Image (spheres, coloured by chain):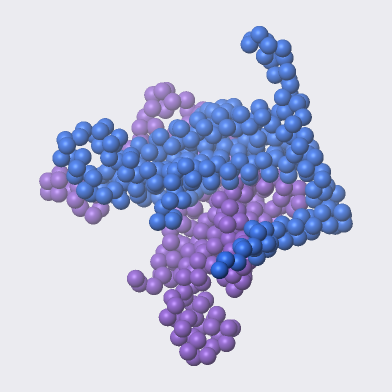
Amino acid sequence: MTLPKAAPRWVQPVTALRIAIIVTILACWEALAASGLLYRDVVPSLFAIGKALFNLLTVPDMPVDLSRLGLQDAKIPAIYWHLYVTFYEILIGMVIGGLSGLVAGIALGSSRLLRQAYEPLLYYLGPCPKIIFFPVMIMWFGVGPGSKVAMGAISCFFPVALNVAGGMREIDKVLIRVGRSFRANTWQMVTKIYLPAMRHPIINGVRIGLGVCLIGTLLAETKLSNSGVGFLVIQAYSLFNMPLMYALLIVLFVIAIGANALIGKFGGLDDIKRR
Amino acid sequence: MTAQAITKTRWFPAVLGFGTVFAAMLLVELLIRLGLINRFIVPLPSDILAALPRVIIEEHVLSRFLLTAAEAFSASILVTIFGVAGGVLLYQFRLLREATETWVAAVAAAPLVLIYPLYLVIFGRNATTIVAMGFTAGIAPVTLKTLEGLAGTRRVLINVGRSFNLTPWQQFWKILFPAALPTIFVGMRLGLIFALINIVGVEFLINFGGLGQLINELAERYDLAGTYAAILFVILISINVFVLTEWLERWLRPVE
C-alpha cells in the first residue's frame, strides 16, 4: 500500500491563505493608488515603490574618494554609505550599552543587597521613553554621531541589565558551588560559570537591546543629523518623495526583522522554545 | 544596632538606592561648583529642582499632561477595541491564526515608530498622527495576548460550558472571555506602555502636543535647568503610570 502523496506546499490551506492575503493587500493598495482617494503620491503605485527601491539599492549617485588607496574615484549608491553610518552607530551603541548592561546585570544578580537597592530603579526607568534624553545627549556629545551612539547605548543598557540580572538569579546553584569548590576567583567565576550558564538570558537581552538600540539611534537620526538611514527617511519626508520613503522603510524593516531572527537563530533561542 | 544588622533591615536597600541617587546629585553639584563640569552643559541639580515649580506653572504642565493623557487614552481605547477584536478573530478562525500569527509577532518586534514621517504625510502635524502612532505601536501586543488568553482557557471550563449546552455566544461571554481577561489585561498594559512611550516620543520628534513637546521647546530655548526638570517630570509620570498599571494587573490576576 502506498501512502497518498502530500499536496504541494503552496496548495496547503495555510500557504494558500497567506498568498491570498498578500495578493488582496497588494491589489487593494494598487486600487487605492489608482483611485486618487488619498492625496496624490501618499499611496504611490507598487511599480513606483519597486522602482524607487531598485534605484535606491543600485543607482550609484554618491562619489567616493579612493585616491588614498591608489584607485580611481568611483560612485556608489548613497544608501550604502548611510547604512554604514547607522550600522556603525548602532554597533558602538550596542557595545557600550550591552557591556555596561552586562556588568550592571552581573553585579545586581550576584548580590541580594545590590539587587534590592538598585534593580527597582532600573526596572522603573526601563520603560520610560528614551528619546526624551536626546537634547541632553546633544549637549553632552554634540550633534554628530556621538549623540546617536549615546542614544543607542542608553536604550540598549536597560533590557540587557535586567535580563542578565534575572538570568544570574536562575543559574543552577550547583554550578556556583562547583566553581567555589574549585576555588575559582571572581574573573574565573564570571567567565567559566556565570556567562556560559546565562547564555540564553544574555542573548535574549541582546536581542531586545538591539531592537531598542536601533529605534533609539534611528529616531535620533530623524531628529537631528546629516547622515544615516533615519536622516534619509526624514529627508524623503521633507522632499515629499513618498516612493523613496516607502522604499527606505522596507529596507529598514527587512534589516530589523532579519537581525532579530538571526540573533534568535544563532543564539539558540529557538531551541529553548522547542524544548 | 550593628552595621550587619542595619543592612539586614527591610528599609535599608531602599535607603541605599535613593541615597546613592542623592549622593550622585550632590557629587555633580560639587563638581559643577568646583568648575570640573561645565555648567553650560550640565546645570546644577539644585537649579533643576528649583526649575520644577517654574516649569509646572509657567509652561502649563497640567494642560500639557492632560493633552498627552487624552492622546494616550484615545490610543488605548482604539488599541483595546481593535487588538481584542483581532485576538478573538484569530482565535475563532484557526486557519487565519496559523497563517498570520507569525506576521503579528513580526509586527510586534518591528521598529514601527520609524513610520511616523509617513503618518505626518497622511494625517498632518496634529494629534491624529500622535494617536495613530500610539495605536500602531500598541495593537500587536494586545492582539497576541488576547489570543494567548483565549487559547489558554482550561479545557475543563470549556467542557462545563458544553455540558450546559451554551450557545457559542454564551460560551464566549460566560466562559472564554472571563477566563482570558487577566491575560488580556497584561496585553492592554503592554499596549498602553508601548503607546505612551511612542506618544511622548513622537510629541518630542514632531514638536507638537503635550509633555514631549515641552522638552523639545525648552531644549530649543536652551533653558538647561528647565529641560532637565521637564525630563525629570516625564520620567516621574511614566513611572507612576507603570506602577499604577502594574498594581491594576496584580489586582485583576487571580491568586495562584
- Report the residue at 48% width, 64% height from top: B186
Residue situated furthest left in the rendering: B2
* Residue A147 vertical placement versus A246 (above, below): above
Q: Nearer the viewer, residue B166 or B146?
A: B166
Q: Where is residue A200 in the image (x, y as percent from the top left)?
A: 39, 46
Residue situated furthest front in the rendering: A1
- Report the residue at 25% width, 53% height from top: B11
Q: Nearer the viewer, residue B113 or B128?
A: B113
Q: Is residue B227 visible?
A: no
Q: Can residue A220 be seen in this view?
A: yes
Q: Chain A is drawn in which colour?
A: blue
The answer to whether B188 appears left or right of A15 in the picture is: left
- Report the residue at 74% width, 31% height from top: A58
Residue situated furthest right in the rendering: A35
Q: Chain B is drawn in which colour?
A: purple
Q: Looking at the figure, which quarter contains the N terminus of chain A?
A: bottom right
The answer to whether B15 appears left or right of A267 in the picture is: left
The answer to whether B136 appears left or right of B147 in the picture is: right
The answer to whether A116 appears left or right of A183 in the picture is: right
Q: Position of residue B21 (x, y in %)?
A: 36, 41
Q: Looking at the figure, which quarter contains the C terminus of chain A?
A: bottom left
Q: Could you say which quadrant of the image residue A138 lies in?
A: top right
Q: Where is residue A105 in the image (x, y as percent from the top left)?
A: 35, 42
